[in-house]
Image (cartoon, rainbow, N blue to C red):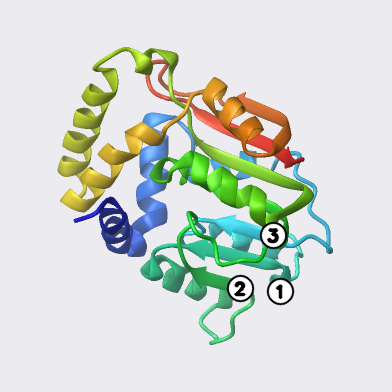
Amino acid sequence: MTDKKNIIQAFTNMAPRYEKIVDSELQNFWGWSYRGVVDSLFEDISVNGKDIILDIATGTGVIPDRLLKNGIDGNRIHGLDITRAMLEHAQLRLNGGNGQKPINLTCASAMEMPYANASFTIAVCGLATHHMSVEILLSETCRILRRGGKLTIADAGGMLYWKIPGIKLLLKIAAFIYFSITDDPSRAWSEADAVSNVRSKEEWSSLLSKNGFEDISIVTLISKFSWISSPLIIKAEKR
């Protein structure tokens, strides 16, 4: 099974209970609710009626739902996710079961976004970058954003001591054991693989600058445990 297949299988299995699982895990690891992290993601983001917004790895549509409730026209909101089952749950949430599609949902990889250059003014990604190649994601996001377009990301941040030889291997083993017990093998493999994609604040800043972004702001949210990777809120603008 490839890494991509592990991710798709894991999130297909999680789709019916995704928000409950994520909320429980965030509360246990960080002391944050899922909604609390989404609220932090939107702090200081100014969205107007002319913006065209992409939610990368939209999952069950929590972020598009927030945008719709804030009065943003659904035609200006796009959600991208690699897992069809997650998008099916997003559709149910967003259309209220009436068969209409108020936003644009696309099943595709964030590593190869099916959008033209400079298609969006805002891109957001909540709690998903650790399942992607960060450099490819940033390159693709820069491509699909217009000049001056805003990027906001919320996800786990790595620690500097993770660079010590053997530490990441131990973290991968720990992740695999934990998710084998609490979930299923596909989730265990996908989360173990994800450890390599978790970046420190310094690494994020360097990669953002390298891939065409400026005005970079990275804030560490207060976490429940000092020894666990803390949540980061990352904001930048396309040069």
Closer to us: 214 or 78: 214
Instruction: Classify 44 as above or below 161.
Output: below
Residue 162 placement: quadrant = top left
Mark 1 burial class by Cα count in 10 Å: few <14, some 14-19, many 20+ = few
User: Label 3 belongs to which residue?
Assistant: 53
In this rendered view, identify the residue nearer to me: 68 or 109: 109
Tag 3: residue type?
Answer: Ile
| Left or right: 127, with 146 as reference point | left
Expressed as whole percent of the image width and height from the top left, the position of residue 68 reads 68, 65
Dot 1 corresponds to which residue? Answer: 75
Which quadrant of the figure contains the C terminus? top right
Which x, y percent locates residue 122? 71, 53
Dot 2 or dot 1: first in sequence order is: 1
Residue 141 coordinates in the image, percent (x, y) = 61, 50
Residue 104's mark? Answer: 2
Query: Quick one: 120 or 87, which is closer to the camera?
Result: 120
Q: CA distance from mark 2 to mark 1?
A: 7 Å
Horizontal and vertical percent for residue 31? 45, 30
Q: In the image, what residue occupies the spot 42% across and 40% down?
A: 130
Label 3 with label 1: CB-CB less than 8 Å: no
Secondary structure beneath dot 3 equals strand
Residue at the spot 59% in from the left edge and 57% down from the top edge: 55
The answer to whether 96 appears left or right of 235 in the picture is left
Label 3 Cα crowd, 10 Å radius (few <14 / some 14-19 / many 20+)? many
Q: Quadrant of residue 217?
A: top right
Q: Amino acid at mark 2?
A: Asn
**Which residue type does callout 1 highlight?**
Asn
Quarter assignment of residue 228: top left
Q: Are marks 2 and 1 in contact (CB under 8 Å)?
A: yes
